Structures are given as structure tokens and as C-alpha cells.
Image: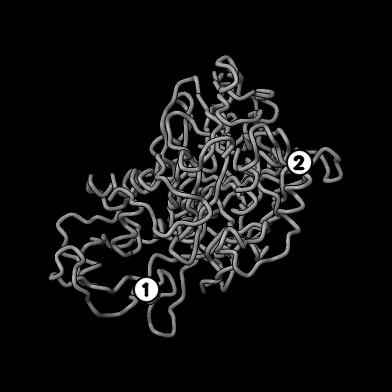
């Protein structure tokens, strides 16, 4: 593999989180945000350009779900695809070292800020290392990537997100993600948290009582991978490079193969579609990727495309505001008409679907604001429309309120039954799982991206939007353990779910870190992000393996 054996590659297990590096100490709101395994880091950043094999989904004798990648690995984290998200404050100067451990030239580029140029393989000479410095000049969302042999190196996995936050809000206004917001974007963020329009919190406001972080934001990098094609790219002789036209032709136009579970028979078209390298269950049940918040906790999602496919990202439950496209903050300055040719869009738009093109085409990256308001189709006193207070929800036909959704939150699947514990074989364990909180999908209307290896729907590029409560409605404190063992009971000495939180299954409370015991916090935040990434490989082969290698308990 690039002149070395496959058994020496790092092996990445599915289910990993999105690591984040916070450069400096004053990046607003990132450290302590449960959406990231964030580590404060002083310069220099040290990246290795290397390779890895990643398990992309469930794996058994009949279904090999492994794929070879090239990766940006920062010294503080295990290898992962994509590379770690880097958060910096505008004006921060970053020292960076990039070492190319592969067998052909590579590079690292952040458009407008960093360009390492061609970095030869370090194995050819010890001084073949890039050492440099750059400044984060512009606020917004950027894709760092390898721009050599474009788009091959980027598509093979050499990409990640670089996020630049402003150092302060503009004047007396509330914070936005930008140092120079347009009046429309500034007005939108100024109105967040106002009782009459968006009741709840402003974007920069957190609440320790509900474990709600300030500056709530997520990053999605859309990507697709072909196990057969990526294997062929990685198996070329030392210094041999596959021409871009060939990989694009094979990646986009190869004939479909019905047995794509076998890498030796699979087509070269993509079999795996992911946000942040995680498909299906590993993304839409992952609080690192899927926004999980209460009504009144608006958040920002930064969406970038690292692949070759055009996506049509669609959000259920809420419409979202498009606040930046390709680095241009949306909305015309005061006194400037929509016919101004310098504007990407005439104003902030409120939509439920938006096109995401590959890099090099318009709209290859954009930021959205999700208001996390009550679903507009919940009946209220003024009918169906914008959700949230002060419009009281109507009473349903069953005599319960339409909001909070008491009936939906009290459904268990299955509704009864136990099984013997797998630990001691004796203790009965309830099987019933509460169907909560309220889960709505975020997915791609370009439907092929919704399957893995040509399989069932909902196993690939999909995330979600989960309502875990409502800041505007008084809710009783619930103890997750009681809710799991005896629905309706609430005799826990110390309620585990914070106020304004819907009742939910115990496992989900742990995953969110809402059960405030230290051991659960460690599991729910740290292990859910990092323990699922396997740092060292086992001797195996990419084409096929009979059994999953042993992983730590």
C-alpha cells in the first residue's frame, strides 16, 4: 500500500466522533461544548499526511464494509476521516508543521490563508517537512484539503474543517459567527432569545442549569467513498499517481454492481456516503453530529462538501436560515439593491432544502441557522404557523396537549417484556425503550446518498434534529433510571435530567451527558467521541476478512 503492506495501516473503527482543536484560549464557546471532543492547543499544529483503513459500518462474513483512505492526522488525536475540525479566533497566528508520510507529493491548503505547496515524501529526505506560519484573517467556514492532483487527493480523504470565529460582537449587537455581518444577519441574531419572536436563548447564551453551552454550532462535511477505487489508488506502485480524469470517470460513471458488499466484485461508484465520516446510525444517533437541543436553543450548522457529488440537504421539523454561502454573508447592505452584482444572494432566505455542490462550483459550503422552534405544524391558538410561545398549543382529541407531545413521549417499543442479563444470565432486564425524544431527519434529497453499499434507506448520509425539551414550558424533573425501570415513577433522590427536558430513555440521557453522575459524563462525552476510534491495526487484508478483529471492551 503505497509501497508498504496493508497490515501496517491504522485501522479506524466506525462510530468515532469529530475531534476539534481549539487554537488559543479565547475561541468563544467551543471548549466545554458537548458537540466536540475539544482540546485547547497552542501552536504549532503538527499534521501527518498518512493513510488508514476504516470500517464504515457493520461487518460480518458476508459484508465487508472497509475502505482505504488518505488522512490528515494531527498529533493530538488518532487518525480519522475527515481530519480534526480546527477552531481559531480571527487574527490568531498559527504555527504549523506538515509531514508527508506517503509515497508521493502532497499538500495542505486553506484558501486565502495557507498553502504549503508540494511536500515531498519524508522518507526520501528527513528535511522534506513543511514548517510555516499563517494568520486566520477571515471569519467563516473553510475546507482545508490537499489540492494536488485535484480532486483525487481531497476525495481520497485529505480534508477537514477550519472555522474562524470573530473576536467580539459588532458594537452593542449580539454575537454572530462573522466579524462583518450584514444588517439582515445581525438582525436575525439580535432577535434570538426575545420573548415575542424567538423565546429562549440568544446564540451566545448558555445555561449551566440545563447543561446548554453557548455558541451552539456543528460542522458537517459531506463525502462519499468507493472501497474498490480507493483500494486501487492506494495500491499503485511507489510514486505512481492515478490521473484525475480516470478517477472522476470511474467514480461517477462506472456501471452499478449488485454485489457491492464484495470489494473484488464491487463497482467503482461510491458505496459509502457520510457526514463527518460516519454513516447511518453512527451519525444520526450521535450527539457529536446530530443537533440535540430544546425549543429556544438556536444553533448554527456549517456545511461543507469534500466529495464529487451534489447534495440537496433537507431539514425536517424546522426551516433554516441560510446565513453564508461560499464565505459571503447573506443579505444586502443598507441602501444597496438586490441587483448589486457583488452579492451572492439578495437577502437571508428561510428554506428547508438547499443545494450543496462539489468544491469549485457555487454553493460548495454554507452556514445555516436552525431556530429550534416548536414545530410549526403543531396546532396552536392561531392555527398552524410559526411555532413557539406565546401561542398556546391546542388540546388534542385524546384530551392531552399537542405540546408537549405527551402521547409520543410515552410510547415504548416493545411495550413490555424482559430478557436475562448478558452479564450474569439471571437478572431480568426490561426490554422496553422509550420512543423519545422527538427525532426528525436531516437528509439529502439526492437519494443515492442515503444508502450504504446499495442497501436499505437510512444507512448513509443522514443526520437529524432532536427535540430534547422546551425552554418555554415548565416540565417536571425526571430521573432517567426511574423512567427506564418504572414509567410514571419519579422517586430518584436527585433528578438526573435538567429542567425543561423531555422524559427520555436512560441510554439516550447517558449519550447526551444529561445524567450528571461523573462516570456517565465520562462515558457520554469522552468515550462516545474517542473510544470508538482504533489507533493501531491488526494484521488483516482490505479485500476480505472473516471476523471482526478484537476491540477493547
Chain-order first, disc 2 or disc 1: 2
Which residue sits at x=77%, y=52%? Answer: 249
Image color mode: one colour
Left or right, 548 with respect to 342, comes to left
For label 1, the SS is helix
Left or right, 518 with respect to 116, comes to left
Which residue sits at x=60%, y=25%? Answer: 121
Mark 1 burial class by Cα count in 10 Å: few <14, some 14-19, many 20+:
few
Mark 2 burial class by Cα count in 10 Å: few <14, some 14-19, many 20+:
few
Which residue sits at x=75%, y=38%? Answer: 333
Q: Nearer the viewer, residue 274 or 212?
A: 274
Which residue sits at x=55%, y=16%? Answer: 126
Badge 1 is on which residue?
A: 406
Q: Position of residue 281 (x, y in %)?
A: 46, 61
Cα–Cα span, label 2 and label 1: 58 Å
Badge 2 is on which residue?
A: 243
For label 2, the SS is loop
Dividing the picture into quarters, in which one does residue 428 lie?
A: bottom left
Q: Position of residue 492 (x, y in %)?
A: 16, 60
Q: Is residue 389 visible?
A: no
Q: Nearer the viewer, residue 518 or 57?
A: 57
Q: Position of residue 17 (x, y in %)?
A: 44, 46
Question: Foreground mark, 2 or 1?
Answer: 2
Amino acid at each position: 500500500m503505497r509501497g508498504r503492506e496493508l497490515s501496517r495501516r491504522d485501522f479506524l473503527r466506525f462510530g468515532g466522533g469529530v475531534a476539534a482543536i481549539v487554537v488559543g484560549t479565547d475561541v468563544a464557546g467551543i471548549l466545554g461544548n458537548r458537540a466536540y471532543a475539544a482540546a485547547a492547543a497552542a501552536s504549532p499544529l503538527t499534521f501527518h499526511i498518512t493513510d488508514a483503513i476504516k470500517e464504515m459500518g457493520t461487518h460480518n462474513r458476508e459484508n465487508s464494509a472497509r475502505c482505504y483512505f488518505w488522512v490528515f492526522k494531527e498529533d493530538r488525536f488518532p487518525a480519522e476521516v475527515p481530519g480534526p475540525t480546527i477552531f481559531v479566533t480571527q487574527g490568531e497566528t498559527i504555527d504549523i508543521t506538515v509531514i508527508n508520510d506517503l509515497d508521493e507529493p502532497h499538500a495542505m491548503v486553506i484558501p486565502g490563508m495557507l498553502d504549503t505547496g508540494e511536500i515531498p515524501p519524508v522518507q526520501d529526505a528527513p528535511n522534506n517537512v513543511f514548517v510555516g506560519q499563517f494568520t486566520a484573517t477571515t471569519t467563516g467556514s473553510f475546507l482545508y484539503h490537499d489540492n494536488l492532483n485535484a480532486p483525487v487527493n481531497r476525495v481520497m480523504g485529505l480534508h477537514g474543517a477550519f472555522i474562524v470565529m470573530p473576536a467580539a460582537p459588532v458594537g452593542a449587537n449580539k454575537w454572530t459567527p462573522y466579524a462583518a455581518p450584514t444588517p439582515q444577519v445581525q438582525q436575525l441574531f439580535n432577535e434570538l432569545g426575545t420573548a415575542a419572536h424567538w423565546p429562549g436563548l440568544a446564540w451566545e447564551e448558555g445555561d449551566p442549569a440545563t447543561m446548554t453551552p453557548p455558541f451552539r454550532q456543528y460542522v458537517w462535511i459531506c463525502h462519499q467513498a468507493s472501497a474498490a477505487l480507493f483500494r486501487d489508488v492506494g495500491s499503485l506502485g511507489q510514486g505512481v499517481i492515478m490521473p484525475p480524469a480516470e478517477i472522476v470517470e470511474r467514480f461517477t460513471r462506472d456501471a452499478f454492481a449488485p454485489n457491492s458488499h464484495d470489494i473484488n466484485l464491487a463497482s467503482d461508484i461510491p458505496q459509502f456516503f457520510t457526514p463527518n465520516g460516519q454513516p447511518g446510525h453512527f451519525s444520526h444517533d450521535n450527539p457529536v453530529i446530530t443537533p440535540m437541543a430544546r425549543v429556544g436553543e438556536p444553533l448554527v450548522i456549517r456545511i461543507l462538501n469534500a466529495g464529487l457529488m451534489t447534495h440537496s440537504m433537507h431539514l425536517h421539523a424546522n426551516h433554516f436560515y441560510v446565513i453564508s454561502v461560499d464565505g459571503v454573508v447573506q443579505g444586502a447592505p443598507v441602501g444597496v439593491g438586490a441587483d448589486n452584482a457583488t452579492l451572492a444572494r439578495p437577502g437571508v432566505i428561510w428554506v428547508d432544502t438547499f443545494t450543496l455542490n462539489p468544491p469549485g462550483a457555487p454553493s460548495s459550503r454554507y452556514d445555516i441557522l436552525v431556530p429550534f422552534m416548536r414545530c410549526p405544524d403543531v396546532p396552536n391558538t392561531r392555527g398552524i404557523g410559526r411555532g413557539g410561545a406565546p401561542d398556546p398549543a391546542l388540546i388534542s382529541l385524546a384530551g392531552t396537549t399537542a405540546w408537549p407531545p405527551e402521547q409520543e413521549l410515552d410510547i415504548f417499543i416493545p411495550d413490555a417484556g424482559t430478557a436475562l442479563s448478558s452479564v450474569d444470565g439471571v437478572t431480568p432486564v426490561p426490554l422496553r425503550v422509550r420512543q423519545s425524544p422527538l427525532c426528525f431527519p436531516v437528509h439529502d434529497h439526492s437519494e443515492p446518498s442515503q444508502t450504504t453499499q446499495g442497501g436499505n434507506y437510512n444507512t448513509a448520509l443522514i443526520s437529524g434534529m432532536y427535540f430534547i425539551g422546551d425552554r418555554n414550558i415548565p416540565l417536571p424533573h425526571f430521573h432517567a433510571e426511574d423512567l427506564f425501570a418504572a414509567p410514571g415513577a419519579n422517586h430518584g433522590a436527585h433528578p438526573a435530567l435538567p429542567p425543561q427536558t423531555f422524559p427520555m430513555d436512560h441510554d439516550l440521557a447517558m449519550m447526551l451527558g444529561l445524567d450528571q453522575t461523573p462516570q456517565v459524563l465520562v462515558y457520554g462525552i469522552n468515550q462516545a467521541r474517542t473510544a470508538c476510534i482504533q489507533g493501531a491495526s491488526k494484521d488483516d487484508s482490505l479485500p476480505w476478512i472473516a471476523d471482526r478483529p478484537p476491540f477493547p471492551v
